[in-house]
């Protein structure tokens, strides 16, 4: 584990997200490369900070080949290398496993679509990650392409749970951020209509995975057409009142069946992670390997 933030040297910015910046860093003593995520909590209430710090502790316990490892959490005072003054902002920093293949969003931006056998192995890895998290009573709540990261061997792992939803939750209150809503299940969007009060939340992660898998096939976010404005109202209409997901003719029967089981609007009828792990789509005899993804990053 990384003991001090001062042991890390910033190399480059890997990306910006909803609430923070991710840097590629080098642990000077061991020459190990990590990803460092810095969340700025300047404008948040103390309660949110405390909740985030509590959830951060949970991250350190997570140890699965299908979930990004966290090698340390630090609060406060990680100042940029060029500045030696403390600006008083509360930062929360996560030292994470570095995923050199970037995110599934990067892959989709470059390739638009993926063939079914690759989608199958992506789905299988994500299901295994969700199986692990759900067994720890962790609901991810933000499964989307940018939170599925790929390492140098083409292995997909889940990133950003726990703390991220604290941050996202605080943001939801202030502005309608598309990324937060797009993959959200009907029962989270509109609990009254869709019985979300009784939902344990796990089913919401399955819904999101279904949309991600379909997006990999269609080459665009599946619920709205390019002509529609991707705002909160449109998504609310489509997710809660729409006909449901339109399945492309090009998808194989197993793939369609898999997607249907994920994007069932009534969360009680939706498949569970364990049921999906037994689904033919992720258990084909001509067993797909994630090594395939290496060719796509
Ligand atoms: P978002 O998920 O909303 O895109 P994040 O702050 O989680 O925002 O991440 C921003 C980007 O940084 C990601 O989309 C990804 O490209 C990159 N990134 C995040 N974590 C890692 C990591 N562990 N290794 C490599 N790249 C990462
Ligand atoms: Mg993320």
Image (cartoon, rainbow, N blue to C red):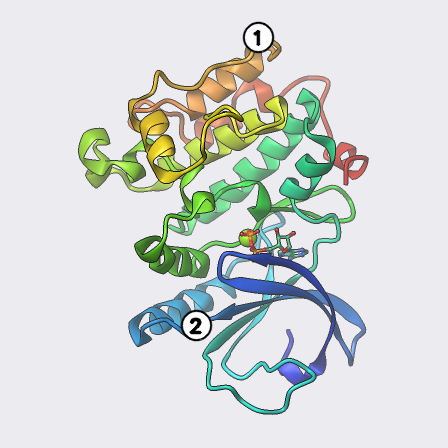
Estimate the x, y position of residue 130 in percent, counting from the top left.
49, 42
Q: Secondary structure at mark 1?
A: loop
* Residue at horizontal 45 percent and vertical 69 percent from the top: 57
* Residue at horizontal 62 percent and vertical 23 percent from the top: 217
Estimate the x, y position of residue 33 in percent, counting from the top left.
75, 66
Quadrant of residue 187 within the rendered picture: top left
**Label 2 Cα neighbours within 10 Å, binned few <14 / some 14-19 / many ≥20:** many
In this orientation, which residue lies closer to the viewer: 201 or 184? 184
Q: Report which residue position mark 2 lands on.
A: 41
Quadrant of residue 290 within the rendered picture: top right
Quadrant of residue 13 within the rendered picture: bottom right
Q: Report which residue position mark 1 lands on.
A: 249
In this orientation, which residue lies closer to the viewer: 287 or 78? 78
Q: Is 123 placed left or right of 112 in the picture?
A: left
Q: Is 36 placed left or right of 62 in the picture?
A: right
**Position above or below: 135 against 121:** below
Q: Is 36 placed left or right of 89 in the picture?
A: right
In this orientation, which residue lies closer to the viewer: 210 or 121? 210
In this orientation, which residue lies closer to the viewer: 116 or 46? 46
* Residue at horizontal 52 percent and vertical 41 percent from the top: 144
Q: Secondary structure at mark 2?
A: loop
User: Who comes first in sequence, dot 1 or dot 2?
Assistant: 2
Q: Is 130 placed left or right of 194 in the picture?
A: right
- The alpha-carbon separation of the residues under discs 1 and 2 comes to 46 Å
Q: Is mark 1 within 8 Å of ligand 1?
A: no
Estimate the x, y position of residue 234 in percent, counting from the top left.
37, 31
Quick check: which quadrant has ligand 1?
Answer: bottom right
Quadrant location of the C terminus in the rendered image: top right
Q: Give yes or no for contact between labels 1 and 2 (Cβ–Cβ under 8 Å).
A: no
User: In the current view of this chain or complex, which residue is farthest to the left?
Assistant: 192
């Amino acid at each position: 584990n990384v003991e001090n933030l001062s042991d890390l040297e910033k190399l480059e910015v890997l990306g910006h997200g909803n609430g923070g910046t991710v840097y590629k860093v080098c642990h000077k003593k061991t020459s190990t490369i990590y990803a460092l995520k810095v969340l700025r909590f300047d404008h948040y209430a103390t309660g949110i900070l405390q909740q985030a710090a509590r959830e951060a502790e949970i991250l350190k316990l997570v140890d699965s080949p299908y979930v990004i490892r966290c090698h340390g959490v630090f609060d406060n005072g990680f100042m940029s290398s060029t500045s030696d003054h403390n600006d008083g902002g509360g930062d929360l920093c996560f030292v994470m496993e570095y995923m050199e293949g970037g995110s599934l969003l990067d892959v989709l931006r470059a390739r638009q679509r993926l063939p079914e056998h690759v989608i199958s192995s992506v789905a299988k890895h994500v299901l295994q990650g969700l199986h692990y998290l759900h067994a720890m009573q962790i609901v991810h709540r933000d499964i989307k392409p940018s939170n599925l990261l790929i390492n140098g061997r083409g292995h997909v792992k889940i990133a950003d749970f726990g703390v991220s939803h604290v941050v996202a939750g605080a943001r939801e209150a202030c502005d309608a951020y598309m990324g937060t809503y797009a993959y959200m299940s009907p029962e989270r969007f509109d609990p009254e209509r869709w019985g979300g009060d009784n939902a344990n939340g796990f089913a919401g992660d399955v819904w999101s995975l279904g949309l991600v898998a379909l997006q990999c096939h269609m080459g665009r976010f599946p619920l709205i057409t390019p002509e529609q404005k991707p705002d909160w109202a449109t998504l609310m209409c489509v997710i809660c009142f729409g006909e449901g997901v339109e399945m492309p003719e090009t998808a194989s029967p197993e793939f369609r069946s898999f997607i249907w089981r994920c994007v069932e609007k009534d969360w009680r009828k939706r498949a569970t992670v364990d049921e999906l792990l037994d689904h033919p789509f992720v258990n084909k005899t001509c067993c797909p390997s994630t090594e395939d993804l290496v060719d796509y990053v």
